[in-house]
Amino acid sequence: MSGTPETSLPSTLHQALLALLGPSGLLTDTTDTAAFCTDWRALYHGRCAAVLRPATTEECAKAVALCHAHGVPMVPQGGNTSMVGGATPDDSGRAVVISTTRMNRVHTIDHADLTMTVDAGVTLKAAQDAAAAEGLFLPLSISSEGSADIGGILATNAGGNNTVRYGNARELALGLEAVLPDGNVLDLMRRLRKDNTGYALRQLLIGAEGTLGIITGAVIQLQPAPRARETALCAVESAAGALALFGAFRKQDPAAVVAFEFMSGTSMGLVNRFIDGASLPLAEPAPAYALVELSSPRAGEGLRSLMEDVLGEALESGLVTDAVLAESETQRNALWMLREEHAEAQKRAGASVKNDVSVPLAAIPTLITDATAACEALIPGIRVAPFGHIGDGNIHFNLVQPEQMDAAAFSARDHDIMDTVAEIVRRLGGSFSAEHGVGQLKTYMMPSWRGGAELESMRRIKNALDPEGLMNPGKIFPAA
Ligand code: FAD
Ligand code: MLT
Ligand code: ZN
């Protein structure tokens, strides 16, 4: 940090924003703004000149135009659940956070198109519930869905538990509305499955992590509600076993598999230790687990027999050593709780370093074996706790500090750990950023992973839309 931090808005801008947004739309007191300046993991602690809370696209566009005219940096923020510090301002105190939480209306649900038109600040859970109330299904599912909102999931192109069947957030967005860095509104709120008219601009905004503009609305593709669902937790010997089981299900009926998740014994152990009410419904702990969910819009017995056939064979061959099937929605929720609480359990276990990586499916066992050995050699006693969306080739290769190590000393090794894992991922043809984004955590990796024409093209696009570099500075792009 250099110079004296500027923590207040220029007074003309302050007056104009107050007139536009009203007192509830403009927070300047640090007791009100503090929560917007720290991330979910409490890794980043920034400061801001104000938090702007527009209630409509029009207000948002006018607020952005005012900030642009005054050269004030802007940090878009939704539910503030980023795993990579993407929504946290820097510590200069110059930026404003623009929060979408007051833009929270579900506008329409269309049964012919199977679409939902929503404001960006509608939480994913509220959007799922609105779809369910109409007998429809919004398939994106992540453990942070109670807070993460539609703008945030699109800005990060979130993945999650149902990607294996329905794709990432990108695949679900038919239309988009965004406020560009100069305050112009980009209205792409079409709900067409076919629309080849020049560049697909919405795809640029999706996954841009708020560096190209603020997403204010979206048209989301829905699905018919599932009428049959089967969920099972399976004990396996290794990630290779989990992959073989995934293959067995896919061979029978790929469309039926809506989720296929992996959990290492170590990470499941942390859930059992740190999460109240967590209890493993199997005879004994296993080296690894797979959580599989099948679903269908058709009611009937087909799914149960598919589940029993595949698991029966797997138990007989020893691929699966134990398994439990949910017999009710309560049991299903209890099984999913064991998976969904992984991030929270790791947070409570001490300092952790996250590697949200993806590799081709066949390379997952090598990734886990090699990265485990490399990390254990790097920091003796490190707790290797991988889990994640194995059906998508996406493993959260997370490392938790040794029991007796100082948390700060462990966190200081974060780049050593990330680089060690990343080099193995690179050798296996993977990506260092699978679903969480680059944020500020991984900007330093960009030149060596996306160098040459790829990073240069990204910079040109950024410069074309945001020549002053005001929109979410310090994210994705390494300092020039
Ligand atoms: P924020 O954290 O507020 O912002 C994230 C990024 O998007 C920032 O760069 C921000 O500037 C930008 N942004 C936010 N809103 C807008 C907008 N309207 N317009 C433009 N840019 C915007 N992620 C997954 O992909 N899969 C998972 O399974 C998953 N599980 C998680 C579990 C837990 C417990 C937690 C805490 C996080 C998890 N995440 C997961 C990460 C996180 O929830 C997602 O990245 C989510 O999409 C972020 O949404 P948000 O509204 O909280 O965005
Ligand atoms: C999850 O899938 O639970 C999160 O994306 C992973 C994490 O906490 O690293
Ligand atoms: Zn995840």
Image (cartoon, rainbow, N blue to C red):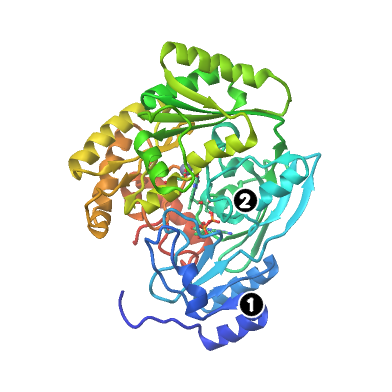
Residue drawn at 51 percent across, 85 percent down: 10
Residue drawn at 63 percent across, 40 percent down: 139
Q: Amino acid at mark 2?
A: Leu
- Above or below residue 455? Residue 38 is below
Please tell me which of labels 1 and 2 falls first in the chain.
1
Residue 114: x and y in percent read 75, 40
Q: Which is more toward the observer, 220 or 384?
A: 384
Q: CA distance from mark 1 to mark 2?
A: 23 Å
Residue assigned mark 1: 24
Note whether residue 171 is visible: yes
Residue drawn at 31 percent across, 45 percent down: 399
Q: Are marks 1 and 2 in contact (CB under 8 Å)?
A: no
Residue assigned mark 2: 124
**Element on which disc 2 rests:** helix
Q: Amino acid at mark 1?
A: Ser
- The C terminus: image quadrant: bottom left
Residue 270: x and y in percent read 37, 43
Q: Is mark 2 within 8 Å of ligand 1?
A: yes
Residue 441: x and y in percent read 37, 55
- The N terminus: image quadrant: bottom left
- Above or below residue 50? Residue 472 is above
